[in-house]
Amino acid sequence: QVQLVQSGAEVKKPGASVKVSCQASGYTFTSYAIYWVRQAPGQRLEWMGWINTDDGNTIYSPRFQGRVTITRDTSATTAYMDLSSLTSEDTAVYYCSRPGGGWRLDDWGQGTLVTVSS
Amino acid sequence: QSALTQPASVSGSPGQSITISCTGTSSDVGRYNFVSWYQQHPGKAPKLMIYEGSKRPSGVSNRFSGSKSGNTASLTISGLQAEDEADYYCCSYAGSSTLVFGGGTKLTVL
């Protein structure tokens, strides 16, 4: 079965960067993109961007453009989301997700809590 | 890219039906038939309930249905059950390979 397993919780200081990983299994990694979505405490879901795991092309939300970098390692069937210049407003749970057709998000990782605090 | 507009909360009694609206613009909900709905229980990852406006993934109860009219999509849950109490989010394709989520709606089963 499809599994997306994310890295563990992180605590970062303002101004730092964080890199969250998402290891995929149960399907052909390069046949599906990986999306990243975040959710601040008590807040809505926010789409951050996605990566074509086959060719590495990326699309980012304008809100995060310039601060987010999504990459992948096909040999490790793992996608990564790197967010820089962190502020307290970046404290959130970050999810990776595997899409199906029609711009839907079929499968989700368990989420990674990133806390930004001085 | 502004968030889609959802009511903050809705409620209903067991067995009743409720509808959650999701209002976008002619650039997202109104232009594309790619609205999806997600259920999220506290502390859990979202779960896909409806895609392409009205299609249900395998395993999702037929008590959940979706529709769209103009710039507004809707999720209807019939025969409310206690387990339906959760947050619900709509999401629309917004062109140029981007997505936009709604603000979320908290469903309370009375």
Image (cartoon, rainbow, N blue to C red):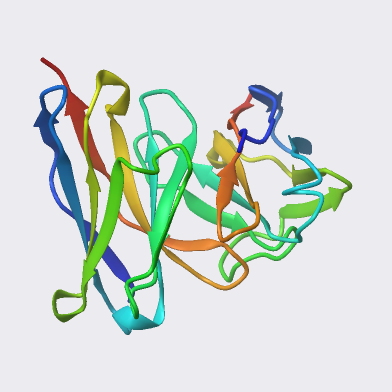
Q: Residue B39's image quarter?
A: top right
User: Seen in the image, is A101 located left or right of residue B65?
Assistant: left
x, y percent for residue A113: 22, 36
x, y percent for residue B96: 60, 59
Q: Which residue is drawn at 55% across and 54% down?
A: B98
In depth, the one of A58 and B84 nearer the eye is A58
User: Seen in the image, is A17 located left or right of residue B102?
Assistant: left
Is residue B77 at all visible to an observer of this figure?
no
x, y percent for residue A97: 39, 59
In depth, the one of A45 and A33 nearer the eye is A33
Is residue B7 at all visible to an observer of this figure?
yes
**Placement of B99 over or under A72, stated as above or below:** above
x, y percent for residue B89: 58, 40
Figure label count: 0
Quarter containing the C terminus of chain A: top left
**Residue with the most extreme front position:** A66
Q: Residue at x 72, y 49 (%)?
A: B28
**Placement of A96 over or under A28, stated as above or below:** above
In depth, the one of A4 and A47 nearer the eye is A47
Q: Residue at x 45, y 48 (%)?
A: B46
User: Seen in the image, is A20 located left or right of residue A56?
Assistant: left
**Residue with the most extreme top position:** A118
User: Seen in the image, is A83 located left or right of residue B17?
Assistant: left
**Placement of B81 over or under B110, stated as above or below:** below
Quarter containing the N terminus of chain A: bottom left
